[in-house]
Structure formats: structure tokens, C-alpha cells
Image (cartoon, rainbow, N blue to C red):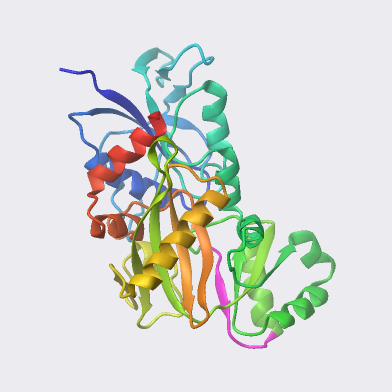
């Protein structure tokens, strides 16, 4: 029998999306082909400790009444001491050290800061371990909505008008911030610059200064920089991107659509807790020309940020055309997430997506 590829699945982390990362990891642990891959589950606690976790998908299922977490079990993962080795070890709670074996590739299923933003990617670069997904630059760009928009705009890709406000600017002159925001019109979305899963996001529909102030304060609890963004009126459509093999062009899935049936926007509860008021339609009803245009723009956006491996590109389809909302370099893999739904609708199964991402990382 040929030897298996050893995959370290890395999940949890310090961000507010800790539980979503755990749930995504649960999906991957359940679907990965065990005849081809040996798995080492590495959890990161909310305090940042790397621990050897249980290889138990059921432990990380997304339960609204008890969100999954990585607990500190006293173990500590020891990364390779240099690029001369790919050996992963674990220090047990009693101080003894066991060798877990050589790692062929790391699958960092991390969402939000301290994981999706290039920090963990930098760690893996330092120790010379191949990993799934984008590198340091693209991960950092994709995580930061201000710089994503800046890069996409420079590439000639339409984005929603926005202003970025720092915590210092808000503390120094809130009246100036509120006055500047008026130029964007209503309604507005207020978002942390470096967070995901709609954490800290508010929709502001009135000209009330208190409503906008409250939204800024909410976003600042997640990040020191906040985007105030014009709400774009249009259909919310998304597609998945996979990197091309051997330098080929990125591949783009069919589109999915988020249809609001009773919520203000696609918030955390709708994304992950299956809350009512939102329907996910995949494939979305688009004309052949619309789909081709969207796929071409998704590939361009992926290339513009120097993406690798995978991404989900989110759009608004307006009467004037497509507007890119976000490029997510590590989209959710939970059973109700749009990224796997789009690829499954394109004829690629969940296990095949995982196989392809590992193959791209090794390449």
C-alpha cells in the first residue's frame, strides 16, 4: 500500500470566530478520506495555546446551545525546530514528550485575526511546512476589508464606496467622523476592518447620530479600525474559487444566492445557526452572460490579492453590474456554508474539495 499523506488540521484560535473554526474543522475531520490521509488534529485555545485535540468530528458540531471550543487539556504541540525537519511532537500534561510523526501539509482552518490574517501562515513559512490556502500577503489583504477594497479598486474591480475610521479618530473627533459619513448616504453598513462572520456588523438605516455612533462602538469592540460603507442595493451572490494547478488560471464554481426573507442582513445567526429569515439558493438563477461575468471577476479578484488554494468571493448584482463585497481566503466549511454548496453544485464533492486543496498545497 502507498504511504498516506499526513495532514495537521489546525483550528480554533484567538478570534471571535473560534467556534466557527471548530465547526469547520469538524466538517473536514468527518469528510477527509482516511484511506489516503492520516490526520493530526491541532487545536488553538482562545488564549493561543496549541494543543493536541480529539479526532472526533462529533465533538465540533455546531450546536446553538453549546458552541464548540478548543479547551486547554494541558498538552502542547511542539513545531519543528527548523526547516530541516517536519516532525511534530506533543508535550503531555505530565511533561513527557511524544513524537507524532512527520507532517506533509498543514490545513489551517482558522477564521478571523490570529489565523486567517497571515499570522499563522507566517509561522508555517518560518518552519518550512506546506499549508493549504493563501500565503502571508493574500491572507492579510483578504482579512483587512480596507486594503482588500483598495487593491480591488486599483485592479479596476467595482467595490462599494467606503470610509475607514480608526479608534483614535473616533475618540478625537466623533463629530467629524459622523459628518464625513453623511456623504455616503443611507443606509450604511458599519463593519470591523479585520473580522468576519458578520461579527460586529451593524446596518444603519436612519440619520440618527446615536444609531451610527452605537454601530461604530460595536465594531470598535472587534477591531481598532472600522469601515463605514454604503449599502449596495442588489442581489447577494457568491462563488467559490480554487487555485489552478501548475500555474493555470483559477477555477470558479457556479454561483449561490443569499435571499433575505425576513432579516435585515446575512448575520451570524443566519450564517451558522440556521436562523430563519434567509434562504440559500444554489445554483443561483443567472443568465449565462451574468454567470460568466461573475466568474471572470471572481478570478480577477483572487489574482489581484495574490490568492492561492481557495477563496469565496461575495458580490452584489446591481442593475449597473457586479460589485465585489468581500474576498474570503478561508471560507467556512460547515454543512450549511456556501463555499462547499457552490462546489457541490458544480460537480465537486465535499471530500474531493479537501483532496484538491491538499494537492494544491503540496504542489
Name the residue located 81 percent from the left edge and 77 percent from the top edge: 175
* Front residue of this view, candidates 315 and 110: 315
Q: Residue furthest left?
A: 1
Q: Where in the figure is residue 72, as x and y percent of width and height?
A: 43, 35
Horizontal side of 100 relative to 111 (left or right) equals left
291 to 146, vertically: above or below: below
Q: Where in the figure is residue 131, as x and y percent of width and height?
A: 44, 32
Q: Residue furthest bottom?
A: 207
Name the residue located 31 percent from the left edge and 67 percent from the top edge: 274
Is the C terminus in the top left, top right, bottom left or bottom right quadrant?
Answer: top left
Residue 63 occupies quadrant: bottom left
Name the residue located 42 percent from the left edge and 30 percent from the top edge: 51
Q: Residue furthest right?
A: 172
Q: Where in the figure is residue 170, as x and y percent of width and height?
A: 77, 67
Q: Which residues are magenta?
A: 199-208
Horizontal side of 275 relative to 209 (left or right) equals left
* Front residue of this view, candidates 80 and 63: 80
Residue 27 counted in the magenta span: no
Q: Is residue 106 visible?
A: no
* Front residue of this view, candidates 248 and 305: 248
Residue 222 occupies quadrant: bottom right
* Front residue of this view, candidates 163 and 288: 288
Is the N terminus in the top left, top right, bottom left or bottom right quadrant?
Answer: top left
Q: Where in the figure is residue 273, as x and y percent of width and height?
A: 34, 64
Horizontal side of 257 relative to 50 (left or right) equals left
**What is the magenta segment's predominant secondary structure?**
loop
Tally of numbered discs: 0
Residue 266 occupies quadrant: bottom left
Amino acid at each position: 500500500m502507498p504511504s498516506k499523506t499526513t495532514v495537521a488540521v489546525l483550528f480554533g484560535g484567538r478570534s471571535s470566530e473560534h467556534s466557527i473554526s471548530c465547526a469547520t474543522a469538524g466538517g473536514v475531520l468527518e469528510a477527509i478520506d482516511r484511506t489516503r490521509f492520516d490526520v493530526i488534529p491541532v487545536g488553538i485555545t482562545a488564549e493561543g495555546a496549541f494543543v493536541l485535540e480529539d479526532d472526533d468530528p462529533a465533538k465540533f458540531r455546531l450546536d446553538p446551545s453549546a458552541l464548540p471550543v478548543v479547551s486547554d487539556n494541558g498538552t502542547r504541540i511542539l513545531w519543528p525546530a527548523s526547516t530541516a525537519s517536519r516532525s511534530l511532537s506533543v508535550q503531555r500534561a505530565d511533561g513527557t514528550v511524544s513524537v507524532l510523526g512527520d507532517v506533509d501539509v498543514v490545513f489551517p482552518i482558522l477564521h478571523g485575526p490570529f489565523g486567517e490574517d497571515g499570522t499563522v501562515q507566517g509561522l508555517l513559512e518560518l518552519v518550512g511546512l506546506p499549508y493549504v490556502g493563501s500565503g502571508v500577503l493574500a491572507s492579510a489583504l483578504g482579512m483587512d476589508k480596507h486594503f482588500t477594497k483598495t487593491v480591488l479598486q486599483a485592479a479596476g474591480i467595482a467595490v462599494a464606496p467606503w470610509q475607514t475610521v480608526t479608534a483614535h479618530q473616533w475618540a478625537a473627533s466623533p463629530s467629524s467622523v459622523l459628518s464625513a459619513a453623511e456623504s455616503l448616504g443611507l443606509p450604511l453598513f458599519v463593519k470591523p476592518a479585520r473580522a468576519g462572520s458578520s461579527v460586529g456588523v451593524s446596518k444603519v438605516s436612519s440619520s440618527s447620530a446615536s444609531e451610527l455612533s452605537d454601530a461604530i462602538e460595536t465594531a470598535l469592540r472587534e477591531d481598532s479600525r472600522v469601515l463605514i460603507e454604503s449599502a449596495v442595493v442588489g442581489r447577494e451572490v457568491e462563488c467559490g474559487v480554487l487555485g489552478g494547478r501548475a500555474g493555470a488560471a483559477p477555477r470558479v464554481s457556479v454561483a449561490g444566492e443569499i435571499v433575505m426573507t425576513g432579516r435585515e442582513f446575512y448575520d451570524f445567526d443566519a450564517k451558522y445557526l440556521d436562523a430563519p429569515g434567509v434562504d440559500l439558493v444554489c445554483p443561483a438563477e443567472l443568465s449565462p452572460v451574468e454567470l460568466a461575468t461573475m466568474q471572470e471577476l471572481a478570478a480577477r479578484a483572487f489574482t489581484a490579492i495574490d490568492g492561492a488554494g481557495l477563496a469565496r468571493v461575495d458580490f452584489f448584482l446591481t442593475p449597473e453590474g457586479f460589485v465585489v463585497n468581500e474576498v474570503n481566503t478561508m471560507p467556512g466549511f460547515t454543512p450549511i456554508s456556501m463555499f462547499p454548496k457552490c462546489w457541490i453544485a458544480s460537480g465537486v464533492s465535499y471530500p474531493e474539495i479537501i483532496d484538491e486543496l491538499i494537492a494544491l498545497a503540496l504542489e
